[in-house]
Image (cartoon, coloured by chain):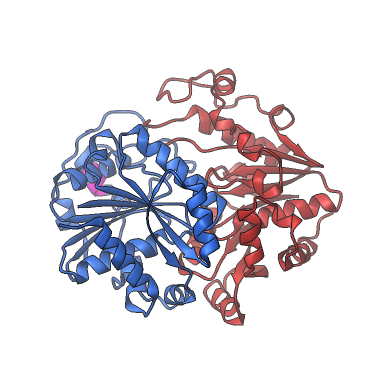
Chain colours: A red, B blue
């Protein structure tokens, strides 16, 4: 089972991914968790100690040079388009129980021009993870599906887009839908988060009527407090856990 | 006066920028509003009609070719690094009262490789806007300062980072602080948004004690409702307006 989680920044995507992964782990699954959003911290949300100390793959300059034969930051020139990556999930992941976590990191855009060796390595890694691993894989992605392509689209069992009651989160969901269709990824579902009332639920259903809804998660101050206290949302008492657990039943894990 | 607004996705950065711009407009200022966050919609938050119909500059392929002499999406090759841009703010902005809005759009990253003509044009445009315009300029940026560089840093009067009570928004603020220091941009201030209690305020002050605080804005369901109803936060009754107005006094506009 390969799951990708996406959505606009701030909708609770990483909180949802962490609850999903911890619940699966609780049920005895081995999960490979991929943090592919440079603006999130899945490791911290999972409750992995010293989450901030994990070096993202994109910042491992020696590894990138070793595998692609090109220096990060170099523009043009030649480098390997199919670097070896199959050993990386074992070698470079942080562990918690039966969860292995990899942090991909971001490709610096700023003033440094077009950086390609890093993105080539990340893309090869994601392709390997989606196509060749037999663990349950959960990927926490940016507001997009940057690392996925035609080759990997058919192997993703479900792309879950998290939305909140807010127009931009809906726009982002539609944008992700479009990007997904372009690469042939058709199994998309939506999770409504931060639901304050039936009205919020209806608003999302009305504006996203072309999507399958996996479920809704109520707004809960306790989730904000958990974040402020540096505690995993799975390790507190919140109704969100029950709702995510029900969604996993719908997803029908073998 | 040149202001840049940044912060993690979902913290209310665009709502804040819209309140800032509309308040300045209300006081008789001419404001050039720059939407530099592909994941936001500043035009809609300002209350500009048909905001979704505004084509971002990055998607104007003919313009990009005309100015840079390179086709968008092309990799390598040569193109003008200093395209003409000084006519664009007049020619390509949407108007509301004395506000001129430009939407920059995003540079597609996905599978399309390294795209440089677009980002070159955007960067030249931002440099022009920051260095050569005499209106008040407010830029709504992504969780970073991508379009700014050493040349423009000293002309930015204040980089305002919006944060909410949440660990990742603090991490993002620290990250932006670091990027800003690297290019010599030193005039940073923080605005705390979605404040539910004195405890939230203390949390932010404690974790961002190396920042100047411009002020705090209380959590307000009315702002969510305004967004759901497609109404500018400036056109509803919310305490946020008063708080933003006070911050403008601190910023000391001439």
Quadrant of image for the C terminus of chain B: bottom left
What secondary structure characterizes most of the magenta part? helix
The residue lying toward the viewer, choosing from A195 and A50, is: A50
The residue lying toward the viewer, choosing from B29 and A93, is: B29
The residue lying toward the viewer, choosing from A145 and B29, is: B29
Residue B182 falls left or right of residue B113: left
Residue A40 in picture, x, y percent from top left: 57, 47
Which residue is drawn at the image coordinates 16% and 64% (left, top)?
Answer: B29
Locate residue B156: give its quadrant: top left
Residue B96, placed above or below residue B103:
below
Which residue is drawn at the image coordinates 32% and 34% (left, top)?
Answer: B183
Q: Which region of the structure is painted magenta?
A: B62-66
Residue A231, placed above or below residue A96:
below
Residue B132 falls left or right of residue B108: left
Is residue A8 visible in this depiction of the protein?
A: no
Residue B36, placed above or below residue A127:
below
Residue A56 in picture, x, y percent from top left: 59, 34
Q: Is residue B155 magenta?
A: no
Is residue B253 visible in this depiction of the protein?
A: yes
Residue that extends furthest to the right in the rendered view of this protein? A28
Residue B178 in picture, x, y percent from top left: 42, 37
Locate residue B90: give its quadrant: bottom left
Residue B118 falls left or right of residue B198: left
Residue A228, placed above or below residue B46:
above
Residue B133 in picture, x, y percent from top left: 14, 50
Which residue is drawn at the image coordinates 60% and 79% (left, top)?
Answer: A197
């Amino acid at each position: 089972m390969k799951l990708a989680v996406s959505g606009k920044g701030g909708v609770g995507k990483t909180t949802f991914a962490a609850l999903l992964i911890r619940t699966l782990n609780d049920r005895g699954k081995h999960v490979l968790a991929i943090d592919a959003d440079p603006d999130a911290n899945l490791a911290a949300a999972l409750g992995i100690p010293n989450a901030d100390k994990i070096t993202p793959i994109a910042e491992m300059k020696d590894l990138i040079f070793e595998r692609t034969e090109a220096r990060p930051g170099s523009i043009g020139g030649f480098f390997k388009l199919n670097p070896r990556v199959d050993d990386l999930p074992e070698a470079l992941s942080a562990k918690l129980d039966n969860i292995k976590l990899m942090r991909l990191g971001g490709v610096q855009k700023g003033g440094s021009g077009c950086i390609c060796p890093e993105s080539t390595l990340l893309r090869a890694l994601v392709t390997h993870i989606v196509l060749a691993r037999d663990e349950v894989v959960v990927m926490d992605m940016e507001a997009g599906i940057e690392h996925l392509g035609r080759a990997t689209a058919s192997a993703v069992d479900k792309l879950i887009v998290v939305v909140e009651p807010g127009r931009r989160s809906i726009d982002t969901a539609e944008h992700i839908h479009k990007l997904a269709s372009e690469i042939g990824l058709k199994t998309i579902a939506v999770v409504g988060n931060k639901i304050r009332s039936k009205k919020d639920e209806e608003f999302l259903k009305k504006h996203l009527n072309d999507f399958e809804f996996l479920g809704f998660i109520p707004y809960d101050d306790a989730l904000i407090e958990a974040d402020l206290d540096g505690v995993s949302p799975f390790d507190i008492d919140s109704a969100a856990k029950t709702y995510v657990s029900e969604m996993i039943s719908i997803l029908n894990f073998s």
